[in-house]
Image (spheres, helix red, strand yellow):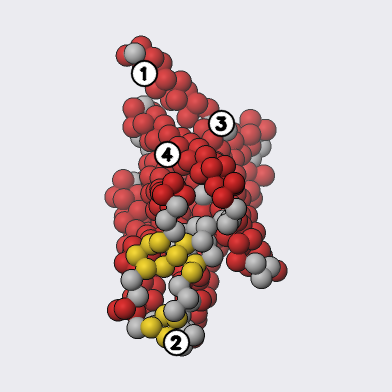
Amino acid sequence: MEPTNQSTVSEFLLLGLTDDPALQPLIFSLFLSMYLVTVLGNLLIILAVSSDSHLHTPMYFFLCSLSCNDICLSTCIIPKMLLSIQTQDQRITYAACLTQVCFVIVFALLENFFLGVMSYDRYVAICHPLRYRVIMNPCLCVLLIMISLLISIFHGLLHSLMVLRLSFCIDLEIPHFFCELAQVVKLACSDTLVENILIYVSSCIFVGVPLSGIVFSYIHIISSVLRMPSSEGKHKAFSTCGSHLSVVSLFYGTGFGVYISFAVTDSPRKSAVASVMYTLVPQMLNPFLNSLRNRDMKKALRKLTGRTTSLL
C-alpha cells in the first residue's frame, strides 16, 4: 500500500458491526434503544439530585458529574452510528474522525477519574466521618472535577496531535462502529512506534492511578466497616458503597474483558462487538445501579415523578 499524507486524507469508512443488510434494522433499533435509555436514565439522576435539597452533598454532586459524562460519551458514538445505518453511508471525514477520537478519549478517561474521586469520597465518609464536611468541602469537590477534566482534555489532545503526524495508507477502512484510537493508528503506513508507546504508557498511568486509588480506598473502607461493633452500622456502610462498587465492577470488568478479547481474537469485528460492552453498556446501566440500591435516590425519583405527574 502507498502511504498518503494526512493532508490529502479526506475520509475514512466505518464498517460497523456487520455487513449483513438484514441485521442493520435490528442493530439500529438496539442502539437507538440503548441511547435513549442512557440519556433518559442519566437525565433522571441529574434532575432528581437537582430537585432534592437533601441530595446536595459531595456524593451526589459526583454522581451528577458521572451522569453528565455518561451522556456525553454515548453521544460521541451512537448518533453517528445510527446516522450511518439509516443513510447507508459509512463515510466519516478525517476531521470528524479525529474529533471523535479526541472526545471518546476525554470522556472515557473522565469516567475513570470520576469513579476514583467517588471512591475517595466514600473513603472519607466511612473512615473519617467526623472530618467529612471539612475535608470534602465544595472547593475541593469542584477542584477534583476540574483537575480530572483538564487532565482528560490534555490526554485527548495529546493523542489527537500524535495522530495528526501520521501518514495513512490508501485502504482507510475502520472495522469498527466509531473511530477508536487503536484502530486509526493501525491504518497508518508511517512509523507508529512513538504513538503505540504513548498509548500503553498513558493507559497505564491514567487508568492505573484511579484504579489504584479505588483499590486503596476500598481496602480501608472494608477494614473500617469490619471493625464496626454494630451490624446496623456495617449494613448502612456497605449499602452506601454498594451502588458505587457495582458501577466500578461493571466499568472495569467490561474494560478488562475488551482487553482480553483484543488479545485472544484476530477478528476486528469481534473486538468491535466487545467494545460495545465497554463504551456503551456501563453508561446505560449506571443510572439503574445508582438508583436501585440507593434509598435516597429512590425517594428523590419518586418525588420527581410525583411532581411531573401532578403538573401533567
Give the secondary structure at mark 4.
helix
Q: Which mark is residue 292?
A: 3
Give the number of the disc on residue 2.
Answer: 2
Q: Kindly identify the amino acid type of the residue bearing the numbered disc 1.
A: Thr
The amino acid pointed to by label 2 is Glu
Check if mark 4's residue and mark 3's residue have beta carbons within 8 Å.
Answer: no
Q: Which residue is mark 4?
A: 39
Q: Residue furthest right?
A: 264
Query: Can you tell which of label 2 and label 1 is closer to the viewer?
Result: 2
Q: Which numbered mark, 2 or 4, is in the foreground of this view?
A: 2
x, y (%) of residue 162?
A: 37, 78
Q: Quadrant of residue 43?
A: top left
Do labels 1 and 4 touch, CB within 8 Å?
no
Please tell me which of labels 1 and 4 falls first in the chain: 4
Q: Work out whether residue 97 or residue 234 is closer to the camera in this orientation and state it.
A: 97
Decide if residue 40 is in sight here.
Answer: yes
- The residue singled out by tag 1 in the image is 308
Sequence-wise, the earlier of marks 3 and 2 is: 2
Of residues 60 and 27, the one nearer the viewer is 27
Q: Secondary structure at mark 1?
A: helix
Quick one: 1 or 168, which is closer to the camera? 1
User: How much space separates mark 3 and mark 1, taking CA atoms?
Assistant: 20 Å
Find the distance from the CA under tag 2 to the CA under tag 1.
Answer: 60 Å
Upstream in the sequence, badge 2 or badge 4?
2
Left or right for 258, reference 209? right
